[in-house]
Amino acid sequence: MSTRYDVVVCGAGPAGLAAAAAAAAAGARVALIDAQANPGGQIWRPSVLLPPTAAARRAMTRTLGAGRVDFRPQAQVIAAGEGEVLIESTQSAERLRYCSLVIATGARELLLPFPGWTLPGVTGAGGLQALAKQGWPLAGRRVVVAGSGPLLLAAAASLHRHGARVLAVLEQAPPAAIRRFASRLTLWPGQALQALALRATLRAAPYRCGEHVRSAHGATQLEQVEVCGRRGSYAIRCDHLAIGYGLVPNIELAQLLGCRLDESRAHARVITDDCMRTSVRGVYAAGEVRGIGGWQAARIEGEIAGHAAAGALRPVAALQRRLRLRRRFAQLLEDCFTLDERVRTLADADTVICRCEQVPLRALAGYADLRAAKLATRCGMGPCQGRICGAALAATGHLARDRVRVPLFPARLSTLADSFDIAAAETDA
Amino acid sequence: MTVRLEVDGRAVEVPDGATVAAAVALVSPVFGRSSRGAPRAPLCGMGVCFECRLTIDGVPGRRACIEPARAGMQVRTHE
């Protein structure tokens, strides 16, 4: 089955919602697809307990309210080629043909391996927040939030509002870096106010900079974490460890299509021009795939991409000015929350790196890149297809990333059968 | 509003809008086992890591963290 659209938008977070709305407003026939059951992405994921924010509500109504956008929930891109993507939904697979494609696939959490990180009870920081919003029982549960970046505070506050007892927030960046970050926040008063509000929500939980979780312990589930503190090590007994070291752009679809990437840092990002055009004709990218910048930047980029993808020649200069200020904020984040060498070397020889295939760090010694390691050890060959271990190995400086291949996600055989002629367009990106 | 479903034969009730992961968490901290038998449970919470895979209505390999809980679902952990 194949359906033709003017614009196909992948990802229904802030960037994708804005892109779909802008393209539809310009008169384009638009499909918006997302792996989740609800629009909003990670940041605007609906909560079973709390009402949506005003910005989230406005964006959803604007994009989906008028019925001009064909929203496809619980659908993932399995393969992509020139002018078409193959998507798989819960029940079926379908080809969507497009004139323009907007890649707004967002980001995932950077999860770094450490002894005990496979124990039930250890999750991402945003990960536990996502679970909590969707009904995960947290009332009265003791939670340690750790890792790096401003999302830790947001996650901790959200967990608190969902009933958790947040015992501590541990930020690996040193106090001096956090002070530098705070002092520059005056340029972004909205962000500064938000940080203060989050801190107020978390009055009871200490925020400790320059500290990190060294290991997690428990028999069949988490019981205790070992913290490397500024005045020595100490243990905290807890039910959950919510730990994230920042975000990794989800560039796989762009890479599969052969879009040029900026690979100068640990995690690649998609290169675009000011109108969000990638190096591949008809393919646009917006939001975190262009480098982590936050939802405000994503929303602006989505709007620009949506106009451009629909061929609507509208003045985007004002949007681009707003965007530059947002992107400066992203640079500030990158400068202040640099990962310390100590958190990049937590895994010992026996620590499982590839959780899918159970490959320990010791098995990975001596390989030049993840591809070589994969062929010999199966590292990165499981269902997550190296999304977790590949990002971790790149961030910790062990192995360079592998290229991507079809299928982009595990798929049903019937879907794969439908992908053969699309897969022929696969590049060696 | 709540949704009733079964996890490993036990009836559980979760709020409307909850995922299968939330329903399983009410029954067991362990969702499955690694190839070497180590206990596993959700990690990323957003459909990326596949650590929460289980069997829903007879279909294996479904991700509990992105699957909305629906009335009458039969869920089997890989525990």
Image (cartoon, rainbow, N blue to C red):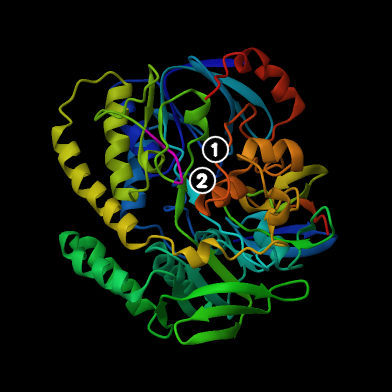
Figure quadrant of residue A76: top right
Q: Nearer the viewer, residue A32 or A195?
A: A195
Q: Secondary structure at mark 1?
A: loop
Look at the picture and state if A321 lies above or below A281. below
Write down the residue under mark 1: A73
Q: Earlier in the sequence, mark 2 or mark 1?
A: 2
Secondary structure mostly seen in the magenta stretch: loop
Q: Nearer the viewer, residue A426 or A158?
A: A426
Q: Are marks 2 and 1 in contact (CB under 8 Å)?
A: yes
Is any atom of residue A336 visible in this view? yes
Q: Position of residue B13 (x, y in %)?
A: 70, 64
Is residue A99 rendered to the left or right of residue B39?
A: left
Does the magenta segment cover residue A269? yes
Q: Position of residue B46 (x, y in %)?
A: 57, 51
Is residue A327 rendered to the left or right of residue A381?
A: left
Span of residues in magenta: A266-270
Figure quadrant of residue A335: bottom left
Write down the residue under mark 2: A38
Quick one: which residue is furthest to the front in this view? Answer: A366
Look at the picture and state if A70 lies above or below A222. above
Amino acid tagged 2:
Asn
Q: Position of residue B79 (x, y in %)?
A: 83, 59
Q: Secondary structure at mark 2?
A: loop
